[in-house]
Image (cartoon, rainbow, N blue to C red):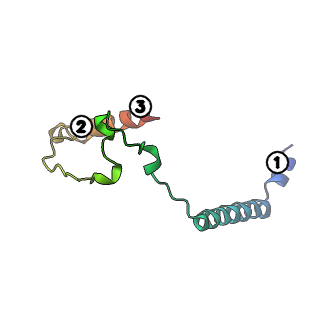
Amino acid sequence: MKERIKGAFTRKKVFHALKITLFVIGVTLIFLSMLGTVAHATGLVDDTINAENLYSKYPLSNYQLDFYVDNSWSWLPWNWLDGIGKSVQYGLYCITNFV
């Protein structure tokens, strides 16, 4: 049984499988980059104009997106004075809660 397992995983076979795997990943990445996959979010919003509804009174092109940067640091979900331990624990909790 040991000889059979050793024969199945020789160095030459492992490198051959690794080369094939890297080749397939490379070809896949090249193929996907040539397709030019682009996501457009404008299709997610209904663009109908209806004067009865205030939210659809004007077309989407009438609005301009503004950016606001809050630099007060009060929006952070942790307190800097608590230390790094509680921050890491909270971060792990958020990651596991997301998964």
**Residue at position x 19%, y 41% in the image:** 75
User: Residue 53's image quarter?
Assistant: top left
Task: Name the mark on residue 25.
Answer: none
Position of residue 20 measured from the top left corner of the image (x, y, whole percent): 74, 63
> Could you classify mark 1 by the number of other residues whose Cα lies within 10 Å: few (under 14), some (14-19), or many (20 or more)?
few
Q: Give the amino acid at mark 1.
A: Ile
Residue 97 circle label: 3
Near-viewer residue (92 or 47):
47
Q: Which residue is mark 1?
A: 5
Residue flagged by tag 3: what amino acid is it? Asn
Image coords of residue 74 (percent x, y): 15, 41
Q: Secondary structure at mark 3?
A: helix
* Quarter of the figure with residue 50: top left
Query: How many circles with numbers are drawn on the protein?
Result: 3
Q: CA distance from mark 1 to mark 2?
A: 52 Å
Q: Residue furthest left?
A: 72
Please name whichever residue, 92 or 25, is drawn nearer the observer in this view of the structure. 25
Element on which disc 1 rests: helix
Is residue 86 rendered to the left or right of residue 44?
Answer: left
